[in-house]
């Protein structure tokens, strides 16, 4: 298997990929990784740390080609080889490519993965590790460019065919690295080493259950169970809508700044979990409310396009609809958001299997039942059905 992992600066991809390597080792697998940036520094030790992108573009390109030649010479010695690089750079030179088509074609990748993360966390790492003036808007645009460029690379890198039959491009996925302690390193491991596993988009209401701890715990239990049995592309791993909501609330109260941290309270994750890996901790960072408000259209637009992309790169969608707590003695209402409804329809329209776990006592409407492959009344019922269908492929040696 040949893999290319891209992503904007500020993702700590090297640390994330080391988690993947460790998971692979524990499962009896070996993964050779090539960190192109580190290799370029070793190729020219006179370049000060953190300053390689300040080089003239011609020098930068020659360094990259030199280290790629080393990768191409060594990769045949390994069954599984992964290149950690970028598709684009948005730096002092402006926007420019970070690859050479001919060398990537020679590498002959089977899988392209563009890694993404919550924008405030990327910003925090950029402030911590790099001296580059940037705005949140810059980072949002860079993320879109990186996804698009990686997808183009995947579609353009048709592997040579030994016969006259058409060939498909390598697989392409967008993957959030997840907030600590909920790293998605295991998801990438499965994409590489267990590709036969079913790929699932777990769908659930997000923003309007954030202040309902019991409902939130219920949804998180569903997410955890999906992640245990499937390759999941969880929309909750990028939860910037909650950042937007905090900024709007702060603006209404006349505040000019909000405080964030790398392991942000925005996350839908269970805060009682302990991190499985040691990450570099960053002190809390204050953001200007006006800066966050300026990217609200970008947050909404990217949620819309990215979540639909995650649906399409999945084999099936499983939507969990909780019952919201009753108010003043009335019956609890279904926690069915417009986003969940759109995701179900999008999956149905693109030929994906669509499953709904419906918890409320009130029956679902025909707009749910007529587009769903099957409706269940509990997660246990759904998991039993998936087991009978043979969807749980062996994925661990232990």
Image (spheres, rainbow, N blue to C red):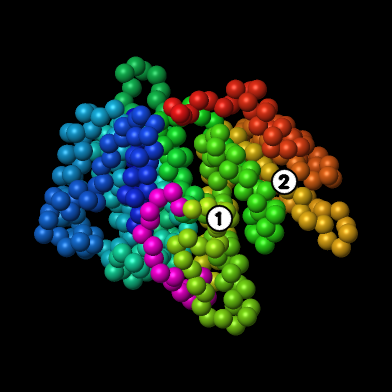
> Disc 1 designates what residue?
272
* Picture quadrant of residue 51: bottom left
- Vertical side of 218 occupied by 57: above or below: below
Q: Dot 2, how many residues are within 10 Å of its Cα: few (below 14), some (14-19), or many (20+)?
A: many
Residue 129 appearing in the image: yes
Res. 324 mark: none
**Callout 2 secondary element:** strand
Quarter of the C terminus within the rendering: top left
Asked if disc 2 and disc 1 are in contact, CB closer than 8 Å, the reply is no
Q: Quadrant of residue 18?
A: top left
Residue 176 at x, y = what percent? 47, 49
- In the image, 54: left or right of 25? left
Q: Residue furthest right?
A: 329
Q: Is residue 97 left or right of residue 265?
A: left
Q: Earlier in the sequence, mark 2 or mark 1?
A: 1
At a point 36% along the width and 18% down the height, the residue shown is 164
- Image height of 359 relative to 263, above or below: above
Measured in 3D between alpha carbons, the distance from the residue under mark 2 to the one under mark 1, in whole angstroms, is 24 Å
Q: Which residues are magenta?
A: 275-292
Per the image, the residue denoted by label 2 is 321
Q: Nearer the viewer, residue 226 or 98?
A: 226
- Which of the pair 219/25 is nearer the observer? 25
Q: Residue at x 37, y 44 (%)?
A: 19
User: Is 284 covered by the magenta stretch?
Assistant: yes
Q: Residue at x 45, y 40 (%)?
A: 186
Q: Position of residue 294 (x, y in %)?
A: 52, 71
């Amino acid at each position: 298997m040949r893999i290319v992992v891209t992503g904007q600066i500020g993702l700590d991809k090297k640390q994330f990929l080391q988690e993947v390597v460790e998971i692979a080792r524990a499962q009896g697998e070996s993964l050779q990784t090539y960190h192109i940036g580190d290799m370029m520094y070793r190729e020219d030790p006179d370049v000060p740390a953190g300053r390689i992108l300040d080089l003239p573009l011609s020098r930068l390109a020659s360094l990259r080609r030199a280290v790629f030649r080393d990768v191409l010479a060594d990769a045949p010695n390994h069954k599984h080889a992964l290149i950690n690089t970028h598709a684009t750079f948005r730096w002092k030179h402006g926007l420019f490519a970070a690859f050479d088509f001919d060398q990537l074609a020679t590498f002959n990748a089977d899988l392209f993965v563009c890694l993404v993360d919550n924008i405030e966390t990327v910003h925090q790492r950029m402030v911590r590790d790099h001296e580059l003036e940037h705005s949140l808007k810059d980072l949002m645009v860079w993320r879109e460019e990186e996804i698009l460029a990686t997808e183009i690379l995947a579609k353009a890198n048709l592997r040579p065919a030994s016969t006259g039959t058409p060939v498909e491009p390598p697989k392409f996925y967008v993957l959030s690295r997840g907030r600590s302690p909920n790293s998605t390193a295991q998801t990438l491991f499965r994409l590489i080493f267990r590709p036969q596993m079913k790929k699932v988009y777990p769908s659930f209401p997000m923003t309007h259950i954030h202040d309902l701890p019991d409902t939130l715990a219920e949804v998180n239990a569903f997410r955890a169970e999906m992640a245990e049995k499937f390759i999941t592309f969880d929309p909750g791993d990028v939860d910037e809508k909650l950042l937007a909501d905090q900024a709007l609330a702060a603006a209404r109260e006349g505040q000019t700044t909000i405080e964030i941290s790398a392991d942000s309270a925005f996350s839908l994750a269970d805060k009682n979990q302990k991190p499985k890996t040691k990450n570099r901790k960053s002190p809390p960072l204050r953001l200007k409310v006006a800066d966050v408000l300026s990217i609200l259209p970008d947050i909404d637009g990217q949620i819309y396009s990215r979540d639909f992309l995650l649906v399409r790169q999945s084999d099936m969608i499983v939507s969990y609809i909780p019952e919201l707590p009753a108010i003043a003695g009335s019956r609890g209402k279904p926690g069915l958001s417009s986003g969940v409804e759109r995701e179900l329809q999008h999956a149905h329209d693109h030929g994906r299997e669509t499953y709904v776990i419906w918890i409320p006592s009130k029956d679902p409407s025909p707009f749910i039942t007529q587009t769903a492959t099957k409706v269940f009344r509990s997660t246990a019922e759904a998991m039993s059905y998936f087991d009978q269908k043979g969807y749980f492929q062996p994925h661990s040696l232990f």
